[in-house]
Image (spheres, rainbow, N blue to C red):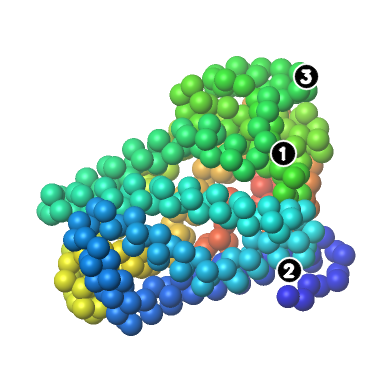
Amino acid sequence: MPVSLDDNPLNRAKNYSNFKYTLSIAGILYSLFLLLIFLSSGLSNALQQALFKLTTNTYWLLPLYIIIISVAYYLLSLPINFLESYALEHKFCLSNQKLGSWFFDQFKAGIISYVISLIAIEFFYYILKYYPHAWWLIASVFWVFFGLILAKLTPLVIIPLFFKYKRICDETLKTRIINLAHKMEVKIIDVFEIDFSSKTLKANAAFVGWGKSRRVILADTLKDKYSYEEIEVILAHEFAHYKKRHLLKLILINSLLTALLFFIIFKTNNPVLRLFNISSLLEMSSLPVVLIYFIAFTIVMQPFQNYISRIFEKDADRAALSITGFKEAFISMMEKLSRQNLSDRNPHPLIKIFFFDHPAVDERIALAESLFN
């Protein structure tokens, strides 16, 4: 994969982003291709019949079916996955993770994905069997609550599997963050730091969890390189999302979209399944068809979801600047982040529509400038 030797940060960021867009599009198209081949070749039906020789109990066979197609998919998509998440990051000096560590993270992510998928799919087939006319609505409600549970478990269980997790030692920074949270009437249990630098040179910060698991997480690559004011304005942005209930609004929007997707599957699955000689959704072999629905629906709805997200992000930027008054810190923070993460500062409108759930860096800086004129 050739990389431009141009040392201009804007050109490097544009080259990096173009590779990311290309690999992302290739990955989506390749996934659809693999699923269509798996279905049209009859392999999905053949795998189901082979498993039925063990038992006809679908609930017992689903774990086997899912793990077989998951491993096959992972191996077949490994080249694109490797290029996108390992080779490209190293080519542009954004990662220092060793190959063995990367594969171990892939293994852990695969286990987590398998467990989550198994729970969701087992429930899907259960309600499909016992509630044939209302399954789409029940599945939509389950999807919401399952997502909330995962949001609570992520900071407690999932993040520690990939990064070392500790309470922040900088008492001055911790006090400033807690005071900011108090000022914005946001409750947090503590401020934590994770060792991003063990794997990536990118920077990030987050306000995660809900209820008693709500906490601030700072990447060490951000904590050690940004001023107190820059970190505060980042977290004021995150707290603003919570105060303005952006997450709840996104959950509601995504829930409605999920209900729409399941309703579309409910109404249209019979003729689609017949194309692949599958009798009904109750057949395990229909699972790749459901996955195709998900991928196609995501492609169609991505511009809308990104548009809504960008509105919320702009709203949070405006609130963070209003609360802190740190215009210069906000601008310097955006400049640093764009260089450190090789962000595409001014993407083509089509790229923005499909890939950007945040306003571009130049837009965010322009907003800060306009608010203080």
Q: In what element is the residue under mark 3? A: helix
Q: Quadrant of residue 44?
A: bottom left
Q: Position of residue 126 (x, y in %)?
A: 20, 49
Q: Is residue 30 above or below residue 148?
A: below
Label 1, residues with CA under 10 Å away: few <14, some 14-19, many ≥20: some
Decide if residue 103 is on the left or right side of residue 77: right
As drawn, the label of residue 172 is 3
Image coords of residue 52 (percent x, y) = 23, 66
Question: Judging from the image, what secondary structure is the residue with disc 1 in?
Answer: loop
Question: Which residue is the site of mark 1?
Answer: 195
For marks 2 and 3, the one nearer the N-term is 2
Look at label 3 and name its amino acid. Answer: Thr
| Residue at disc 2, secondary structure | helix
Q: Quadrant of the N terminus?
A: bottom right
Q: Is residue 142 visible?
A: yes
Camera sees residue 242:
no
Q: Between 363 and 13, which is closer to the camera in this rendering?
A: 13
Mark on residue 15? 2
Q: Residue at x 87, y 65 (%)?
A: 7
Residue occupying the point 22% across, 57% down? 58
Residue 332 position in % (x across, y down): 79, 42
Q: Amino acid at mark 2?
A: Asn
Q: Nearer the viewer, mark 2 or mark 1?
A: 1
Q: Residue 306 vs residue 52: left or right?
A: right
Mark sitting earlier along the chain (1/3): 3
> Which mark sits nearer the N-terminus, 2 or 1?
2
Q: Amino acid at mark 1?
A: Asp
Task: Give how far apart the Cα atoms at labels 2 and 3 are.
Answer: 39 Å
Report the Cα–Cα distance between label 2 and label 1.
Answer: 27 Å
Question: Which numbered circle lies on residue 367?
Answer: none
Give me the residue at 73% from left, 53% from top: 97
